[in-house]
Image: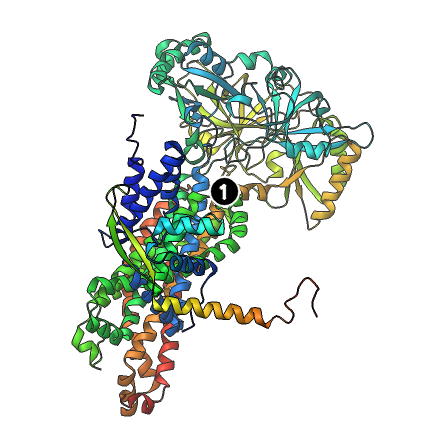
Amino acid sequence: MSKHHLGEFEEVVLLTVAILHDEAYGIAIIDEMEKRLERKVSIGSLQTVLRRLEKKGHLSSKLGEATKMRGGKRRRYFTLTSYGRKILETTKEQRLSLWNAIPNLDYRNGYA
Amino acid sequence: MPKKDHQNPPNCILSFFRWYCRPDYLEDLEGDLRERFSRQSEERGIRNARRNFILDVLRLFRPGMIRSFPNRINVINQDMYKNYLKIAWRNLFGSLSYTIIKILGLSIGMACVLLIVFHVKDELSYDRSFSRSERMFRVTNENFGEGARHWAATPPPLGPEMRRDLPEVEMAVRFHRPSTYQLLSYTPEIGETRQFKEEGGYIVDPEVVEMFNLEFVHGNPNTALSEMNSVVLTQEMARRYFGNQNPLGKTITDDNRRISLKVTGVVKKFAYQTHLDFNYLISMPTITNYQDEGALASRGWSGFYTYVLLKKDASLNSLRSKMEDFMVAFYEPHGETRTETLSLRKLRLQPITDIHLHSKLEKEMTPNSDIAYVYIFSFVALFILLLAAVNFINISTTQSFGRVKEIGVRKVVGAKRKQLIQQFLTDSVLVTFIAILIALVFFAIAIPYYGDLTSKQFLPETIFTLSNLGILLLLLVAIGILAGLYPAFFISKFNLVSSLKSRKNTGPRVNIVRNSLIVFQFVISVFMIVGTVIIYNQMNLFHNKDLGFDKEQVLAVTMFRDTWENLDALKGKMLENPSIGSFSIATNAPGDRFGSYFVTPFGNSQEYSEGFDARVMWADEKFLSTLDISINKGRDFFDQLPNFKNTEFIINEAAAKMFGTGDPVGKRVVIGRDTANIVGVVGDFNFASLHSPVEPMVIQYNPYAGNHLLVKIKRNQLPQTIEYLEKTIESLAPTSAFSYSFIDSRLDELYATENVMSKVFNAFALLSMLISCLGLYGLSAYAARIRIKEIGIRKVLGSSNLDIVKILSIDFLKLVSIAIIIAVPCTYFAMDRWLQDFAYRIDMQWWMFALAIIIVLAIAVTTLSYQGIKSATASPIKNLRTE
């Protein structure tokens, strides 16, 4: 069994869900990502990733309250599980260790 | 569109979403979509919101979001098939030799079917590819009364008059063949004259371009055939004379008639099969150079092939009902009363698509094929396929005994009968699939040879069409399933408990179905072999029968105008050469089509009803001696040159019979414009194909008429003598071509179709024998294996090897014998029917059947003994050990 490595999009989605804390549902996640990262996100790709992450156990979800604006349909809120949090941190550490391994951080003056 | 509620997204799109979306995602996704929609309709307007909604729904239509659709009909349960395929594949290699036999048999069978399918399709496609084939007809002319003949050609005025008087006729096109071949030449500005002997030239009406969809490469289709002395060539012919130059405007000369023809067009040959095969077309106005006015106006001369095109909405029946009255009006100027015309004649409209396979009229353009051969070939293909399928079934059922344990286990684990059947069907479909691939390879290899054999062109475009591939697929599924059905059912019936125990579940020793299949196979094989022997003998008869004249080493040299003009010198030169025996000038050589004329006795009654139709030819006084034909009564012609005054007739025995009792010698008869005495009677000789009995024939003396110089060459000096002739003619008549053929070759060509059939039959007989033997081998191998313990015991108790071989083989030999007993009468009837077609036929003799029987028995015995010996020499100790 190989360890699941987070894809770039998956990582971003997880982070956004973490940012939104209790308010992470479909539309809100899209808005947040589009606002912060200035990239277009389609509902389809986002929803696919959300479901996949939930299947893998990185996210958990529950249904919230219905509003009139949604024609009486409830929202589904996603939250990070501890497993999800752990994999985010693992990923972050991997990245940082790579960054630290670069010999000279000062690019402007070229490499040592 | 009615105004939608501001707050609601488009309803139909929403329903579509609700239909495809997974139920557990549905609610919140719909909610998200609606939220988005509301927000966007406020921020960016309703139109934008709607558009984005639609886009979002479409983009959400992806695998992760689509619900799984329940299979309401459980037709194919996908999952098990992966397993079935895996097991089927493994089983292929498990019993490799059986698999090879099955596959080989099937692929040979299918390759044969493929070849024959294409052959038959090709034959059936003749004349169907014109744009209006279903409305095109050829007018034929049937005569009743004395000398009844049905002519494929009609009088010249018929075409135009039909067009004029019958409103249903849109177009009429006539073809006239000025002579069987012509001598044409082209003289370029620089270089030598090129001269060719051409066949397939016709004088045609200009509407031929439109009616037959002629495609012009050079020249104007509308005007190319309107003016006198114009000729349109096919591309191949143009290339022969002019290379790659554009031939428009150049002149080709008809050397015989000394006519200059201007090339006004070049056309492509028909890309598809048709009975109309031409090399060049001459414009109709030119006909005055070839025929005189009297002939052109004649209403009694069947000299033109007339084709008519019906108008689109015209009814064929209404046209047919008008033909009688039209015919009466047509023959009135000929001097016939209405009653006479109606009782003596009938004009028929023959659909153009019927010609190739069904038309055997007098004076066909070229000899046609016969639908009988289509049937025969189809049956042959079917038989071979059946043989292969039978093999397949037999071997599969015997193989199944080896899988008894597997089936038992599957049943225990819960397989339903239906599933077992599905599994074994998969097995057979897989084998069939592999067999088809190999069949395609065989087919690809065989096609060039088959095409040569049947002189057909097999072009890739026509072969690899979508519809053909569809047929192939259908064949695959049909054979795979049908052939696999019986074994599948048979296998799934196995008793659960006894199959799991090690008890030998061999099934009944006497398996009716399997045995009858073997019998069936051998019946077919015997039939094919006997058929081959009989056909071979009949072909030999054609080749070797005494025809009543000497056909060995006789040349027929074509006479051209220049040859005529220098005839005396030529004759002198020929007399000088000792290798040249007799020579004669005649209008027809044996093997040609002889013209048919009406012979009337000259005497008291001048009525039509007395007289008969006979074949007529013209020759000089040396004709009979050159061909060594014996005179039975009267005398030969004598040389009347240089003052030829009185023509004379010599008739054959068949014609003599028409005169009843009494000596025909001395009687006067009228043929055409000539009245003369009969001076001699010769024995019947076969101047035409042996399909028909010898017809009444008249030879008329005329030293000036003749297309052929018949030369009998003595001794064994053929090549030198031919060279001598060639040089002589070249020097005496330099503008003529030297063109000759041997009489026996011309005669052989009459049997071209039978020749093809004979070869095809041979090949298929071989194949069917092969397949049957494969089957026999497989089954006997299996039977031997089953009885291995029994054999071991017998050996121990003292049987010799021979005894064992006998014991193993006897059952199968009984079956083969039954097959032979059934096959012989069937074959007898079938071949008898085929032989009826020939006026001269062999008698089916007992030795032909005996030969075939011996061959079949020999092969069967060899196959069985091989198996028998293998088993008999196996060590009994090894085999008797219990597992």
Label tally:
1
Q: Is residue B14 above or below residue A74?
A: above
As shown in the figure, which amino acid type bears the numbered disc 1? Thr
Left or right of B668 in this view: B493: left
Tell me the quadrant of the picture where the N terminus of chain B can be found: top left
Q: Position of residue B880 (x, y in %)?
A: 28, 89
Evaluate whether residue B857 shows in this view: no
Identify the image quadrant of the C terminus of chain B: bottom left
Can you give x and y, in whole percent of width and height, for residue B571 in the image? 73, 33
Residue B493, compared with residue B298, is above or below; it is below
Which quadrant of the figure has residue B735?
Answer: top right
Position of residue B776 measured from the top left corner of the image (x, y, whole percent): 34, 68
B437 or B139, which is in the foreground?
A: B437
Q: Identify the residue at image location x=66%, y=38%.
A: B740
Q: Which corner quadrant of the image does residue B789 belong to?
A: bottom left
Check disc 1 and report its element: helix, strand or loop.
helix
Residue B349 in which image quadrant: top left
Residue linked to disc 1:
B462
Around disc 1, counting alpha carbons within 10 Å, would you say few (fewer than 14), some (14 to 19), or many (20 or more)?
Answer: few
Badge 1: chain ID? B
Residue B831 placement (x, y as % from top left): 36, 49
Q: How is the image coloured?
A: rainbow
**Vertical side of B661 occupied by B295: above or below:** above
